[in-house]
Amino acid sequence: MSTKAQQTPALVLASASAIRQTILKNAGIAFDIYPSHVDEDHIKAQNSDLGANQMSALLAKEKALQVSNHDDRLILGADQILEFQNRLYDKVSTQKEAKERLQTLSGQRHDLVGALVLAKGGKIVWQYQSRAHMHMRSLSDAAIDAYLRRAGTGILASVGCYEIEGLGITLFERIEGDHFSILGLSLLPLLTELRRREIISP
C-alpha cells in the first residue's frame, strides 16, 4: 500500500459546517471534507408532511448519498432541525429575523432534532437520531438586542440563532440533551460505530 493511500482518511464529512469539523478534529478523527450540494429547500417542499425526525433523517441521508455517489469511502451526513410547537423552522438570514426568532422562542421550550448517517457504496449503512429539549428563559427586547450586538452575524448559521458553546448559552435556563447532539453531531454513538468499523482505534 502506498504512503498516499495510508494517509487518505477513511471518513468523509459531507458538510461544510465549521462546528462539525471542529468536533471531529477535537476527537482526533481523521477525515476529508466533501460538502454535499443537495437542494434542501426543494426536499423540504416536496416532503412538507414530514415531522422533524423524518425530515432530519431524510436530509442527512440525501447529503451522504449524494457524496457517496462520487466517493467510495465512508460518508458522514448530518442534519439538524428546530421544532417548536409542531412546526419546523429554517435558518434566518438577517439580524432582524434573528430578533423575531428569539422573540418567538423566548420563555418557551423548543427541540433540536438531529440525524447522523453513514453511507458507503451508495447505500446507508448506519443512522442515529437525537432530540434535545431547549428551555429558553424569558427575554426582553432589550436583552435580545444586547445579545445580538455581542454575538454578531455568526449566529445566523444556527437555526436557533444561538451557539451554546458561546454567548448563546446565556439565553437558556435549562437544557435536556447531549451536548454534542445540540452542537449538531452526536459524537459518542458515532465513535462507537467508527470503532466497530475499525475506522478509529479501539
Image (tube, rainbow, N blue to C red):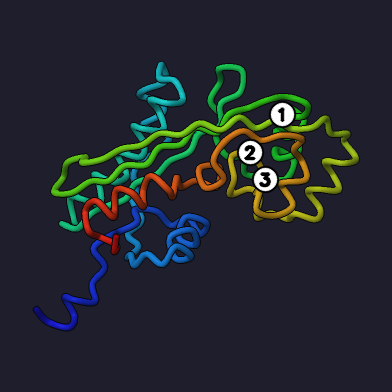
Which of 142/194 is in front?
194
User: How much space separates mark 1 and mark 2, taking CA atoms?
Assistant: 8 Å
Q: Residue at 73% of width from left, 55% of height from top?
A: 152
Q: Which one is nearer the viewer's eye here, 94 or 70?
A: 70
Q: Residues within 10 Å of mark 2 (few under 14, many from 20)?
A: many
User: Which residue has dot 2 on it?
Assistant: 160
Residue beneath the point at 74% across and 32% down: 136
Left/right placement of residue 119 relative to residue 34 reads left
Find numbered disc 3 in the image and state the secondary structure of the residue it sits on.
loop
**Residue that numbered label 1 is attached to:** 105
Mark found first going from the N terminus, 1 or 2: 1
| Mark number displayed over residue 135 | none
Q: Residue at x 15, y 57 (%)?
A: 72
Mark 3 or 1, nearer chain start: 1
Label 1 secondary element: helix
Question: As shown in the figure, which amino acid type bears the numbered disc 3?
Answer: Tyr
> Can you name the residue that lies furthest to the bottom here?
3
- Is the residue marked by circle 1 packed among few (<14), some (14-19), or many (20+) residues within 10 Å? some
Among all residues in the image, which is located at the extreme left?
1
Q: CA distance from mark 3 to mark 2?
A: 5 Å
Nearer to us in this view, 125 or 65: 125
Q: Which residue is mark 3?
A: 162
Q: Position of residue 200 (x, y in %)?
A: 29, 62
